[in-house]
């Protein structure tokens, strides 16, 4: 079997032993956690970022609190002291996903599925013309899964690139129909990107959708449940 090039940890943030975690965070993370209006949201932030530090600590053999995490100009976190370790985090409601890879930039997205959204109306706002057409052609029962396929794949790609949504959302197209493989179909700003980036769906907890973007060919993914103990 091929060696995993990306490891993805599924983190149940609401199950975190919070009292044992806060000391793992740096000053900036603690300050961010304290700014959430709802205690629950602050707790989830602490849990997700603690899990991230524990995953990174195991990869680079350093105590979690001592890891320096910096952010690029558009917000993508990185390890200034370990440029070969690529990672990304996504959290939504009570879960988080962490992707870590030796050397291949990655982006990950997790979304809690809301079954009552107007997928077609939202696609007008967030999707490219080709993606809107693909969604609109789906039968009614596939609109929600199709929409979340598109959303998570787009977000994962943007996060892999590190550009964030400031760079716009309609200059590239992903597939989204449930029976089609996950593919970056076009990037009109950087046509070569279709051969340089791969997109893959991930297993997600019940009620969530998730996708991974990775620089290079489709990676072997080692999908693991994060253990708090
Ligand atoms: C910030 C953004 C990168 C992701 O936001 P999000 O989907 O709300 O949140 P996620 O949980 O998936 O990701 C957040 C994490 O990604 C990381 N991140 C932040 N900026 C990033 C960037 N530019 N690139 C990659 N990762 C980034 C951080 O670890 C962040 O965690 P933190 O906020 O707890 O520090 C950005 O793309 C955004 O604002 N998205 C808004 C959602 C949207 O409109 N999506 C349209 C998709 S079609």
Image (cartoon, rainbow, N blue to C red):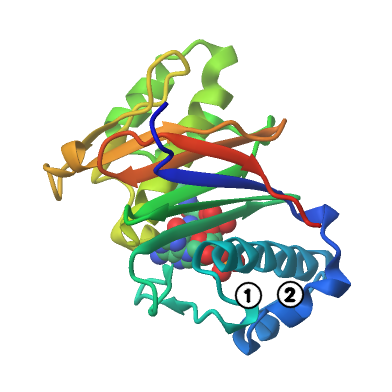
Q: Residues within 10 Å of mark 1 (few under 14, many from 20)?
A: many
Relative to 30, residue 162 above or below: above
Alpha carbon distance from label 2 to label 1: 23 Å
* Residue 169 marker: none
> Which of the 4 quarters of the picture holds residue 220?
top left
Residue 68 position in % (x across, y down): 50, 82
Element on which disc 2 rests: loop
The front one of 128 and 207 is 207
- Residue of label 1: 64
The answer to whether one can see residue 126 in this image is no
Residue 139 position in % (x across, y down): 50, 10
Residue 71 position in % (x across, y down): 43, 76
Relative horizontal placement of residue 4, taking residue 50 as reference (left or right): left
Relative to 155, residue 151 above or below: above
Q: Residues within 10 Å of mark 2 (few under 14, many from 20)?
A: few
Element on which disc 1 rests: helix
Q: How many marks?
A: 2
Task: Look at the image and tell me in which quarter the C terminus lies.
Answer: bottom right
Relative to 158, residue 45 above or below: below
Q: Residue at image x 79%, y 68%?
A: 43
Closer to the chain start, of discs 2 and 1, is 2
Task: Look at the image and tell me in which quarter the N terminus lies.
Answer: top left
* Residue 36 marker: 2
């Amino acid at each position: 079997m091929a060696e995993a090039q990306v490891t993805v940890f599924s983190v149940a943030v609401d199950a975190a032993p919070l009292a044992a975690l806060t000391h793992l965070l740096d000053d900036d993370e603690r300050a961010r956690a304290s700014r959430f209006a709802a205690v629950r949201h602050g707790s989830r932030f602490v849990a997700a970022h603690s899990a991230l530090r524990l995953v990174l600590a195991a990869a680079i053999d350093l105590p979690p609190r001592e890891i320096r995490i910096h952010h690029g100009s558009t917000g993508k976190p990185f390890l200034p002291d370990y440029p070969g370790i690529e990672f990304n985090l996504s959290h939504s409601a009570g879960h988080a996903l962490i992707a870590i890879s030796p050397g291949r930039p990655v982006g990950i997205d997790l979304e809690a599925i809301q079954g009552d959204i107007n997928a077609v109306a939202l696609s007008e706002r967030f999707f490219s013309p080709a993606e809107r057409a693909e969604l609109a052609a789906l039968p009614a029962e596939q609109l929600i899964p199709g929409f979340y396929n598109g959303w998570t794949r787009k977000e994962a790609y943007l996060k892999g690139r590190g550009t964030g949504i400031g760079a716009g959302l309609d200059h590239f197209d992903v597939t989204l129909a449930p029976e089609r493989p996950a593919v970056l179909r076009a990037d009109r700003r950087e046509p070569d990107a279709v051969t340089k980036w791969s997109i893959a769906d991930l297993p997600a907890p019940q009620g969530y959708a998730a996708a991974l973007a990775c620089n290079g060919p489709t990676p072997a993914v080692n999908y693991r449940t994060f253990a708090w103990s």
